[in-house]
Amino acid sequence: MDTAAKKVLEIDYLVFLILSYIGMRVGELVALKWKDIDFDDPAIGITKTYYNLTNNTIKYELVPPKTRRLRRKITIDEDIIKALQKHNEVQNKVKDRLGLAYHDKGFIFAKKERQPGYPIFIKTVENRMGPIRASQSISNELYANLCYFKMLNNLVGFPPASFRFHATAGTIALG
């Protein structure tokens, strides 16, 4: 993960970190707001997903997950908390610089340029993750397995980060 942090944008690293450690869906990630993060008892609450049929930045919807089981609270580790805090500092500088031009609805993954403050597109995340996975020599199959193991980890309630992904070695490890 350290190599990913050095080679990509700050937001890309945070997206990759959260997706790979937690195994959440991209729509859930894009819909995350700062109020969904518990910094005191490190966890992310997943209560909604992003929906944008027309790909029009300002005409998005936040909808409940498909099933009640998908509404969940996932414990996160210190690496994710630190990365979120760093991202929050960067985002606050953007808000200060743009003032009222920033559409502040509390999204963690908000645009910084055109229509600043609106959530980024799911397709943007998917397009940006390809080069990161490639730079880490992560095959599609291994990445899918990682997401599957993370999902199992969250479903059965193991402590956070019970599964660790070693991108350079191309392995998934317990503990």
Image (cartoon, helix red, strand yellow):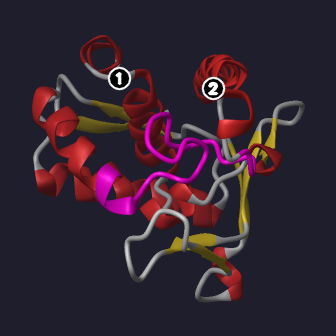
Task: Identify the residue position indicated by label 2 in the image.
Answer: 91
- Residue at 63% x, 41% y: name it: 160
Query: Looking at the rendering, in which quadrant would you find the N terminus?
Result: top left
Looking at the image, which is closer to me, 67 or 175?
67
Judge left or right: residue 72 versus residue 20.
Answer: right
Residue 6 visible from this viewpoint? yes
- Disc 2 marks a residue whose amino acid type is Gln
Residue 148 visible from this viewpoint? no
Q: Residue furthest bottom?
A: 67
Q: Position of residue 147 (x, y in %)?
A: 37, 56
- Residue at 70% x, 22% y: name it: 92
- Disc 1 marks a residue whose amino acid type is Leu
* Distance of label 2 from label 1 (alpha carbons): 13 Å
Task: Identify the residue position indicated by label 1 in the image.
Answer: 9
Looking at the image, which is closer to me, 50 or 93?
93
Q: Position of residue 64 (x, y in %)?
A: 68, 81
Q: Position of residue 156 (x, y in %)?
A: 62, 64
Q: Is residue 5 above or below residue 95?
A: above
Few, some or many residues within 10 Å of mark 1 (<14, 14–19, 20+): few
Secondary structure under badge 2? Answer: helix
Dot 2 or dot 1, earlier in sequence: 1
Q: Is residue 123 magenta?
A: yes
Give, as a single range, the part of the protein colored magenta.
Answer: 104-124
